[in-house]
Image (cartoon, helix red, strand yellow):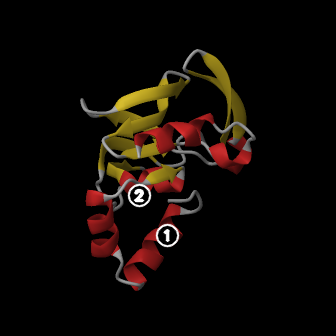
Amino acid sequence: MPGGESTTMLKLIGYEDLWEPLKAFGETKPIFGTCAGAILLAKHVLSPHQVSLELMDIDVERNAYGRQLDSHIAQVDLEGAPLEAVFIRAPIIRRVGAAAKVWASHRGDPVLVTEGRHMVATFHPELTCDPRVHEIFLRQV
């Protein structure tokens, strides 16, 4: 599920009546959600509360780093090596369930998490040339 504006994505999902088909797909197939996609996969969404697909046992706070001007690039550690992470009006994962694995953190908060067949990143790995995040997802599936 791509990054973008989760509120707009929610409106389109509702308008096209895609809630049940998306949830059914996620119950049997892997989904990788980046930024807004991570929000849609979360069990609970904060600031403000909104509905989601509840496919991963994580709590996510929307736009938690701040406004557009607070978007930033940071180095995070991924399997012992630095990874460039692009945060654009990014959410913060505030809680991960016991079955989740945290692969990378930023400022003490998880930013790359897997649980079962699903993966979320609160940053945009597609905006860098580093393929490792996508490779982790492909190894899972």
Residue type for callout 2: Leu
Left or right of 93: which side holds 87?
right
Q: Please say if 19 is above or below 106.
A: below
Q: Secondary structure at mark 1?
A: helix
- Residue 88 is labelled as none
Question: For the image shown, how many numbered marks are present on the structure?
Answer: 2
Residue 122 percent location from the top left of the image = 53, 42
Left or right: 122, with 129 as reference point:
left
Q: Identify the residue at horizontal 49%, vertical 44% (top origin).
A: 138
Residue 37 vertical position relative to residue 138 in the rendered view, above or below: below
Q: Which of 54 and 32 lies nearest the eye of the viewer?
A: 32
Camera sees residue 45: yes
Q: Residue at x 43, y 36 (%)?
A: 113
Few, some or many residues within 10 Å of mark 2 (<14, 14–19, 20+) = many
**Mark 1 residue crowding within 10 angstroms, few (<14) / some (14–19) / many (20+):** some
Three-letter code, disc 1: Met
In which quarter of the view is residue 130 placed?
Answer: top right
Rounded to the nearest angstrom, the CA distance separating label 1 from label 2 is 9 Å
* Identity of the residue furthest to the top in this view: 80
Secondary structure under the numbered disc 2 in the rendered image: helix
The residue lying at 53 percent from left, 50 percent from top is 34
Among the two numbered marks 1 and 2 on one chain, the one whose residue lies closer to the N terminus: 1
Q: Residue furthest bottom?
A: 16
Counting from the top left corner in percent of width and height, residue 29 is at: 34, 58
Residue at which label 2 appears: 40
Q: Which residue is mark 1?
A: 9
In this rendering, would 36 be left or right of 21?
Answer: right
Q: Position of residue 54 (x, y in %)?
A: 28, 55
Residue contact at pointers 1 and 2, CB within 8 angstroms:
yes
Where is residue 38 shown, x and y percent of the image?
Answer: 46, 50
The answer to which of 130 and 123 lies nearer the viewer is 130
> Residue at coordinates 50% horizontally, 59% vertically from top-left?
1
